[in-house]
Amino acid sequence: MQKLRRQRRSRRLPLSIPVRVYGRTTENRPFRDVTETNTVSVHGGLLTLAAKVQRGQTVLLVNAITEEERECRVVYVESKLWGKRKIGVEFTNNSGDFWHVYPSLIHSK
């Protein structure tokens, strides 16, 4: 049986952008984590997180360079027993270029 390749909605860029992540752990405790991205895309990013989160939950992502905030949904959580886990986040509102690396999204007036 042939494996179907899932096509991505947008290209991933391997960039390390400093971010702050705010949310609640799986035990409903508030957390703030200062970390950085591994990869970014128009629709979200992949980053490491010390706090324990689960797929489907909402977190607030702050770009530490621009101080812009964006609500995100956790779409991937790395299976790992110890240490920081890689998590994938998807923007709940996809307006504009949160990462400021996609020039085609910048509209001139």
Image (cartoon, rainbow, N blue to C red):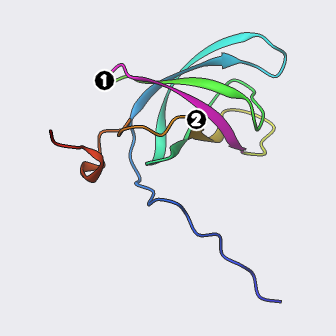
Residue indicated by mark 1: 66
Amino acid type shown at disc 1: Thr
Q: Main secondary structure of the magenta part?
A: strand
Badge 1 marks a residue whose secondary structure is: loop
Q: Quadrant of the C terminus?
A: top left
Query: Along the horizontal axis of the image, is 85 left or right of 107?
Result: right
Residue at x 81% of width, y 38% of height = 81
Q: Total label count?
A: 2
Looking at the picture, tell me which residue is in the foreground, 107 or 18: 107
In this view, the residue farthest toward the top is: 30
Q: Position of residue 26 (x, y in %)?
A: 82, 22
- How busy is the neighbourhood of tag 1: few (under 14 within 10 Å), some, or many (20 plus)? few
In this view, the residue farthest toward the front is: 109
From mark 2 to mark 1, how far is it between C-alphas? 19 Å
- How busy is the neighbourhood of tag 2: few (under 14 within 10 Å), some, or many (20 plus)? some
Task: Give the mark nearest the N terminus, 2 or 1.
Answer: 1
Q: Is residue 66 magenta?
A: no
Q: Position of residue 27 (x, y in %)?
A: 84, 16
Badge 2 marks a residue whose secondary structure is: loop
* Residue 21 circle label: none
| Quarter where residue 101 is shown | top left
Residue at x 58% of width, y 36% of height = 48
Residue indicated by mark 2: 92
Q: Which residues are magenta?
A: 67-77
Amino acid type shown at disc 2: Thr
